[in-house]
Image: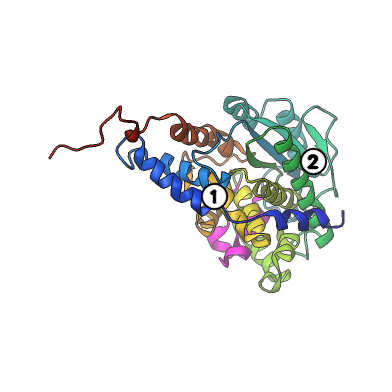
Amino acid sequence: MSGESLRRTIGRIGPVDEEARARALAWQDDLTKVPGSLGELEALGVRLCAVAGQCPPPVPAPGFIGVFEGDHGVQAQRVSPWPQEITYTMGVNLAGGGASVSVLARHAGADYKLYNVGGLRELPAGERIVNCRIAAGTADLTQGPAMTREQATRALEIGIGAAEEAVADGARALAPGELGIGNTTPAAALIAAYTGSDAETVTGRGAGADDGMLARKTRAVAQGLQVNDVAHQDGLGILAGVGGFEHAAMAGFILGGAAARVPVVLDGVIAVSAALAAVALAPDAAGYLFAGHLGAEPGLAVAIEGLGLSPIIQLGMRLGEGSGAALALPLLAASAKIMREMSHFSDGQVSSEREE
């Protein structure tokens, strides 16, 4: 891949429609309810209008969850308590319908596929599996770049292609998910690099690191930031230096959604780190993002704040895969239906006059 798809996609991403946002605010005030009484559902509906450029907004359904898989050389530093073989077995489980995100996707009426972008092993052929491996895992980010710029670009374009295909098939909201043992370490490094935070602030326990492992993980993040000189890299250089194949593909998936003007619902710390990469490449992409949830990883809150978002739900989730985004999809659809289906004071059926 030459990078032409990435350049073309970035060129198609423009700002959200501020005129539609203004119309949406007036529309909300005319609905038969006390202004503000539906809380964040109202804000979500207004943002959907700005994304789509119309008021009321189209319902963002059905959704599509693109799950991207990769393994990580930084696991040589023992940053996760789980063996990398689990990336493969969880991929098989997810594609077979038995993972958390599989269940929640069905609940949300969303389709999903698993893209093996950088797993150590090829996945078996299947209806929901796309084998598109660039390499058998990344290099160890503590020793140098995790990926070359060319590899990161290829992964970005895999994500773009996945988004374009999903939208062409009828998806009206996208949610990036992931699988990869050790992938909260590069996520923490990406968040630190893109937000200017330190390793201690953004590094969490991931899938159950004890105190000793958390200390090793934090050192690995700090070393990766230093070795890859992230302060002097551009957005793509940061992604290649300390990211993973799934992070890059998720960033491309986000860019593809923004270029198609569909809402992109983020999951946890991996997804928001990818979103920071996408926004570094195309700043206007930020307007198309919705934070699905706020979980326990410390880097998640830092990234959500950096992206200027508010989480839709907060249930203490920390599973990943895209599960929090899948759970948020029906709430986002509800915010659009409120705007499309509620009656208006101006219709004259309900009075908006208060008693003095």
Q: Amino acid at mark 1?
A: Glu
Splitting the image into 4 quarters, where does residue 67 fall?
A: top right
Residue 283 picture quarter: bottom right
- How crowded pointer 2 is (Cα within 10 Å; few <14, some 14-19, many 20+) is rated as many
Element assignment for label 2: strand
Outermost residue, left side: 356
Residue 343 in the image: state x and y as whole percent: 38, 30
Residue 117 seen anywhere in this rendered image of the structure:
yes
Dot 1, crowdedness within 10 Å: few (<14), some or many (≥20)? many
Query: Is residue 101 rendered magenta in the image?
Result: no
Residue placed furthest toward the bottom: 232
202 displayed left or right of 7: left
Identify the residue at horizontal 74%, vertical 39% (top origin). 87
Q: Is residue 313 visible?
A: no
For mark 2, what is the residue? 116
Horizontal side, residue 134 vs residue 341: left or right: right
Q: Amino acid at mark 2?
A: Asn
Q: Position of residue 180 (x, y in %)?
A: 71, 44
Which span is picked out in magenta? Answer: 183-206
Q: Is residue 175 left or right of residue 6?
A: left
- Judging depth in this view, the residue of 130 and 63 nearest the camera is 63
- Pinpoint residue 72: horizontal percent, then vertical percent: 76, 51
The residue identified by callout 1 is 297
Residue 198 part of the magenta-drawn span: yes
Q: Are marks 1 and 2 in contact (CB under 8 Å)?
A: no
Q: Nearer the viewer, residue 153 or 54?
A: 54
